[in-house]
Image (cartoon, grey):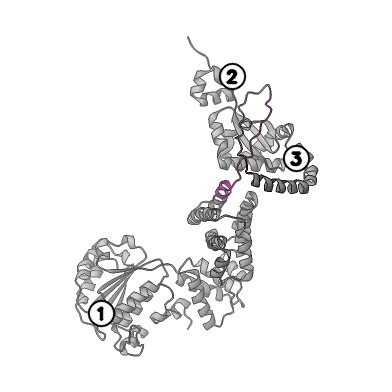
Amino acid sequence: MSTTFYRKYRPQKFSEVIGQKHIVTTLVNALKLGRVAQAYLFTGPRGTGKTTLARLFAKAINCSKRKGAEACGTCIHCLLVAEGRSFDIIEIDAASHTGVDNIRELRETVSLPPAVGSHKIYIIDEVHMLSIGAFNALLKTLEEPPAHVVFILATTALHKVPDTIISRCQRFDLSRFLVTSIVEKLSRIAKEEKLIISKEALEIIAFSAEGGMRDAESLLMQIVALGASPITEDTVTEVLGTTKKESVTALIRLIGENMLYPSLALVRKIAQSGADLSLFTGLILHFLRDLLLVNTNQEKGLALLGELTSEQKASLTELSALFTPIEIVTMLEHFQVAQGTTKTAVIPELPLEIAIVKILANSHEQPPAQKDLPLSATTEVASPLTAAPPKKEPSKTQSTIEGNNKQQAVTVSTEKEGRTNETKKALFDLSHIKTHWQAILDTAKRLNASITLGLSSARPIETDGSTIVIAVKYPFHKERLDEKVNQLTLEKAFDTILGAKMKLVIVLENTQNAASSPVADENPLINQALSILGGRVVNET
């Protein structure tokens, strides 16, 4: 008869337990020194070994031939436990025994001596499910149990357990398993089951389990049930609905190259393929963590990630050159937020898309150096391009080095610039921009509907190279268009319609209507209404 992997390969000794080293060490020392307490509380996420540790500890407490901390497995008590017939270890599922009557029944049996072993051990699983009355009934017994009784409580929701109960127990917090620990256990199972499975496939299963060993073992059994051999990365991604690591590196590369639209398009493609975006974001976080190690110290970082293939190491080395450590930390922060909200988002890919836009907005290059621009005689605009900050004088040595470098750069780039100057001049011509202005506005509004109000009074007034000055009538329009996200939207609209990367400067017009109307000055919304409806302010006498 078949059985699940997590039951078949459940640890039978403390030495077989993977992870939770600090907890295992404490329990082992308590057994060796004979200092077993009367109440323990194991808390942690699902699948982290709470019930397994409770059973191992209970078995070892009553073992009559125990040497050290490990149960012998041959005495009468160990045999009864293995067969599930021990009367001295009582497991209670609090989820189905929540009432005060169930705990009162327990209190009546507590005083009875153990049948075979030295102690009577109660394992209460999901103890947080008990009612308030049941907790109150348990409290007195937990505080002063008979000498032959040991309580072991387990819960996945510690905040639901009363402090009065917690304070009477030795508390142990079990953490999620590391990916490497899960891969180690799955590799052992695969070897025992004579499965041919790639390491990449095991890693994806481990990522998908989100730190739960039981979940990982269940996923492995689900994949094995397909009958595919060997089990490859493609097999696992198809079954689990996740993505390959190549998608992660592709996205990080696009972000490193400041490619906003291709990055968003890749996320959309992954979402449409049916992938679990929460798992995909988890893969991104793990990859960025490795990238940070390599970025800060390439040699030591790669040595620490020794289990990676040469191809994966080469990819990390290549991508680390695109970022600074603070930029990687910024990406980790944004993607961590996205990972936490993807599961509950109405549009699953939206948190990822927002994270990408924010990352690129933070790393967006600064506005170009300010230069004097000739202003039109008919337009009264205070252009920020006319106020360039003074530059510092470089040292003589620095001037010599920079002069040599600039001379070489000019020699190499002269021909290329000569070929492209005429094309750029045509693209950045003000009349050319005005001709396509309505299409640019429509594209920007389609990309981001919230920008519509800010664009209602916007118009291009002058250009200088790839920089365009856009004038608006009202301060709140300028504030809206100066926001980084809206700046990116406008730049994307220009790129889409004109096929050119533009730098935008938003300025205010000094309109005569605003100056002559103190009411409009006090409330720009009135001025906006006058502009839209074609009205004017009348002073009544």
Secondary structure, magenta segment, majority class: loop
Tell me: 237 left or right of 539.
right
Q: Quadrant of residue 228?
A: bottom right
N-terminal of the pair, mark 2 or mark 3, is 3
Tell me: 481 left or right of 497.
left
Label 1 or label 3, whichever lies nearer to me, is: 3
Q: Which mark is on residue 512?
A: 2
Q: In which quarter of the image is residue 142?
A: bottom left
- Badge 3 amino acid: Lys
Tell me: 269 left or right of 527.
right
Relative to 227, does residue 470 appear above or below in the rendering? Answer: above
Q: What is the crowding at mark 1: few (fewer than 14 residues within 10 Å), some, or many (at least 20)?
A: many
Seen as rendered, the residue at the extreme top is: 541
Label 2 or label 3, whichever lies nearer to me, is: 3
N-terminal of the pair, mark 1 or mark 3, is 1
Q: Which mark is on residue 120?
A: 1
- Badge 2 amino acid: Gln
- Residue 379 lies, in percent from the top left, at 65, 23
Region in magenta: 356-375
- Residue 498 lies, in percent from the top left, at 72, 40
**Dot 3 lies on which element?**
helix
Q: Which mark is on residue 424?
A: 3
Q: Is residue 360 magenta?
A: yes
Quick one: 316 or 16, which is closer to the camera? 316
- Residue 133 lies, in percent from the top left, at 23, 62
Q: What is the crowding at mark 2: few (fewer than 14 residues within 10 Å), some, or many (at least 20)?
A: few
